[in-house]
């Protein structure tokens, strides 16, 4: 969560969406800006190293298919 929060604003929402999946809502954010935020999170996660009992592990980001975007236009402010 620390990685996500470092790239998000207070108005953004992050939630666990399954066992190891997350979803992020970026209200009032243009698509190009949202894509830049997603890429910055992806890059930071790709550079993380997790140490467990002296063994180093890296986290891979894998998507089962193309990334899809849903733009909500009927949300109250």
Image (cartoon, rainbow, N blue to C red):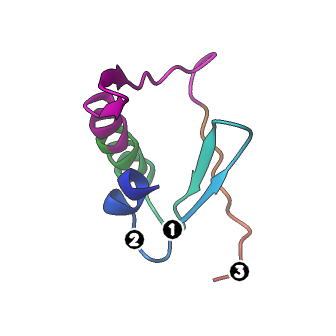
Residue 65 in the magenta stretch? The answer is yes
Marker count (numbered): 3
Instruction: Give the vertical position of 75 relative to 73 (above or below).
Output: below
Which sits earlier in the primary sequence, circle 3 or circle 1?
A: 1
- Gap between marks 2 and 3, in whole Å? 18 Å
Q: Is residue 14 left or right of residue 31?
A: right
Q: Give me the residue at 44% from left, 77% from top.
A: 10
Instruction: Tell me what residue is drawn at x 51 percent, y 68 percent.
Output: 12
- Residue placed under numbered mark 2 in the picture: 9
Q: Secondary structure at mark 2?
A: loop
Residue 37 horizontal/vertical position (percent): 35, 49
Q: Report the Cα–Cα distance between label 1 and label 2.
A: 5 Å
Is 45 on the left-hand or right-hand side of 23?
left
Query: According to the image, label 1 marks what residue?
Result: 12
Instruction: Provide the residue designation for mark 3.
Output: 76
- What's the magenta region? 41-67
């Amino acid at each position: 969560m620390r990685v996500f929060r470092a790239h998000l604003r207070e108005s953004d929402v992050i939630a666990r969406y399954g066992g190891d999946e997350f979803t992020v809502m970026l209200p009032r954010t243009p698509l190009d800006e949202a894509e830049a935020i997603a890429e910055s999170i992806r890059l930071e996660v790709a550079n993380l190293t997790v140490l467990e009992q002296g063994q180093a592990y890296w986290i891979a980001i894998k998507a089962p298919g193309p990334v899809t975007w849903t733009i909500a236009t009927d949300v109250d402010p």
